[in-house]
Image: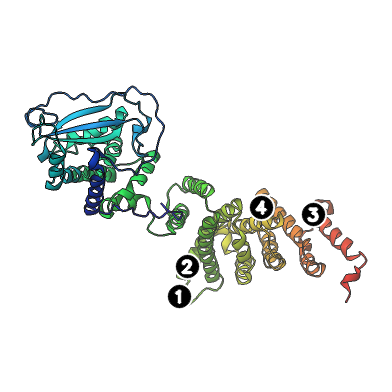
Amino acid sequence: MNSGGVMKKKQRTGSNSRLSSVLAEIDSSYNDGTVAEGSHKSPSLRRSSSHSILPLSAPSFAGGFNDAATADVILSLVLDQQYPLADFSEASSDATVDQSEIQIHLHSHVLRRSKYFAALLSDRWQQQNESSSNNPEIPPKLHRYNLTVPATTASINHHLTVLQLLYSDDLFSSIDNVSTALNLLPIALELLFEDCIKACVKLLEAVPWSEDEEEKILNLIPFLSDEESKELLARVSPVRRDSSEEMLHGLILSAIHNHPNMAFAKAFVAKLLRDFSSRESIRRVLDKAFEKSLRVVKQSLEEYSSPDFRGDHNETEAIQRLNLHTAMTNGKHLLWLVERMIELRVADTAVMAWSEQASFTADLQRAFRDDAWRNIVPSLPAVVLRCTSRLANAVATGNILATKQVRMKLVRDWLPVLIICKDSVSPMGPNHKSLYLELEETFLRIISTLPLSDAQGLLQQCLSFSTRNVDDCPHLVSAFSTWFRRANRPPHPDSFE
């Protein structure tokens, strides 16, 4: 797998290339009478284990596996203590075996199910074998081959199992779990046992994998043909580069719009967002959802503030109620999105967008001057102001580093909304009072970051923050004291041209 996460195929792309590569291997290794398996495996450590080698019992029928009476092939599994082990089988953690080889009696017509053995048994190799054999005690028709395998009990057992499966017409009854398939598939690939390869792949396609099993499958995929690996790759390889972002965006929309247990779904999606590795992906996903929800809220308030009265009164009233409910529902979604964006420190775009809502804030002011919303969506002002408060506080605390223009417009456009909400909501509950006070303090802190000339006009609008008792508005007193202290400071020489 390359650094970009795209699996690249190795040379094995089909049975023909498997066969051609193994013919070259047979040709090069035939001189010493030993046929070794492929070498594309990495060394692994071994540890002791209680596994034992499968017993080579007498065959259950004539002509069966290991039937010496009818066999015309003797295959010696040469046990090599130094043989490199594959990463995708369990043999690397098994005990080593001290004996040097295991002999098995097999049948050439059965072995030909494996293209590896079919190549060995072809006329070309048979003639070489017979001409190189000077032992008169061996009948000409009896072929002897060596197959080098790792000297571990698990590896030997897996090789014996694959050789036994050459005699079986029902491979699926033996390959019935992921562990078995992963242990047998590398050997089936080496021996070019196509039926066994297909059976292993078919099982792996159909069942779930653990994370460790998935890694082993990914290691095996390069040795499978395109057709064999197609379904396996489809499970683990994204079709598009933005699949994760598309999934997250879909989950956000489902959690805030469609899921019946909205609170639980939102909490789960919030965790997914926190745990996701790419901040930039999270930023794009949340920006997209924020833009959509903000657009719906703005459109609903615009239609409410400038209704079309061409219909009858009842119809118009129903549409107005719908507009307010739509604005309220999507306002709550917007608040959740803003809180996630601030939590994950990706609210830059949201702050900028919120500071450029002159027409939206004008629609809000018109809507809140009307008493109709009080009985339909009494919490709408609080929802809108909570969005404003969260974003403004992120700016004031430095969580979001906003430019001077953004800071100024954020206060200039949303300060009138705060003022009209304070005037419109009566009686004022404790929750509303704390929200208004929090937003007042935040606006005053942002104003303190602006040039004196810009702060002057905005502070004059903040007189509505004053209370009957001056001691009840220390934040306002502090803001004006700061401004006058700065204004009365002797001008800096560099300030004059």
First-in-chain label (4 vs 1):
1
Write down the residue under mark 1. 311
Q: Residue 249 or 357: which is nearer the viewer?
A: 249
Spatial CA distance of label 2 from label 3 is: 42 Å
**Closer to the camera: disc 3 or disc 1?**
3
Write down the residue under mark 2. 319
Write down the residue under mark 4. 432
Q: Position of residue 179 (x, y in %)?
A: 30, 35
**Disc 4 vs disc 2: Cβ atoms closer than 8 Å?**
no
Category of crowding for the residue at label 2, using alpha-carbon neighbours closer than 10 angstroms: few (below 14), some (14–19), many (at least 20)? some
Category of crowding for the residue at label 4, using alpha-carbon neighbours closer than 10 angstroms: few (below 14), some (14–19), many (at least 20)? many
- Identify whether 464 is placed above or below 275: below
Question: Disc 1 marks which amino acid?
Answer: Gly
Residue drawn at (65%, 66%), measured in percent from left and top? 355
**Disc 1 vs disc 2: Cβ atoms closer than 8 Å?**
yes
Q: Position of residue 205 (x, y in %)?
A: 28, 46
> Quadrant of residue 238 in the image?
bottom left
First-in-chain label (4 vs 3):
4
Question: Disc 3 marks which amino acid?
Answer: His
Residue drawn at (11%, 47%), measured in percent from left and top? 123
**Closer to the camera: disc 4 or disc 1?**
4
- Identify whether 398 is placed above or below 112: below
Q: Residue furthest front?
A: 134
